[in-house]
Image: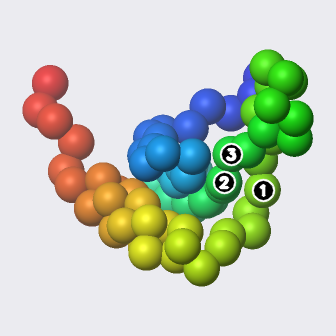
């Protein structure tokens, strides 16, 4: 089974909003997930993700959601 790829990703610093496109009988519907990236250990090259945000993250999360919303509502470019 092939892993679904995001339709679009918006990132500001260590926060990111991922837009997922789901084709339905009524057309494409979108869902958005928001994650905070962090390292468990400074020496670890791998990043972890969380869906928990601190007070100082909230306005950035709001901006990410605004940008994701704008992307969803924009008409696709003409071919």
Decide: few, some or many residues near mark 2? Use Cα within 10 Å; few <14, some 14-19, many ≥20.
many
Q: Which residue is mark 3?
A: 37
The quarter of the image holding the N terminus is top right
Evaluate if marks 3 and 2 touch, with contact meaning CB atoms under 8 Å apart: yes
Q: Which residue is mark 2?
A: 36
Q: CA distance from mark 1 to mark 3?
A: 7 Å
Label drawn at residue 75: none
How many badges with numbers are in the image? 3
Residue plotted at (33% across, 59% down) = 67
**Judging from the image, what secondary structure is the residue with disc 1 in?**
strand
Q: Which sits earlier in the primary sequence, circle 1 or circle 3?
A: 3
Q: CA distance from mark 3 to mark 2?
A: 4 Å
Q: CA distance from mark 1 to mark 2?
A: 5 Å
Rendered image quadrant of residue 31? bottom right
**Judging from the image, what secondary structure is the residue with disc 2 in?**
strand
**Would residue 76 be found to the left or right of residue 24 on screen?**
left
The quarter of the image holding the C terminus is top left
Residue 29 seen by the camera: no
| Image position, residue 69 (x, y; %) | 35, 65
**Judging from the image, what secondary structure is the residue with disc 3 in?**
strand
Rendered image quadrant of residue 2? top right
Evaluate if marks 1 and 2 touch, with contact meaning CB atoms under 8 Å apart: yes
């Amino acid at each position: 089974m092939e892993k679904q790829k995001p339709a679009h990703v918006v990132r500001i610093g260590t926060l990111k909003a991922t837009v997922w496109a789901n084709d339905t009988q009524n057309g494409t519907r979108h869902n958005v997930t928001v994650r905070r990236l962090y390292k468990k250990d400074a020496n670890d090259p791998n990043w972890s993700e969380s869906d928990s945000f601190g007070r100082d993250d909230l306005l950035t999360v709001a901006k990410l959601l605004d940008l994701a919303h704008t992307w969803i509502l924009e008409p696709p470019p003409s071919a």
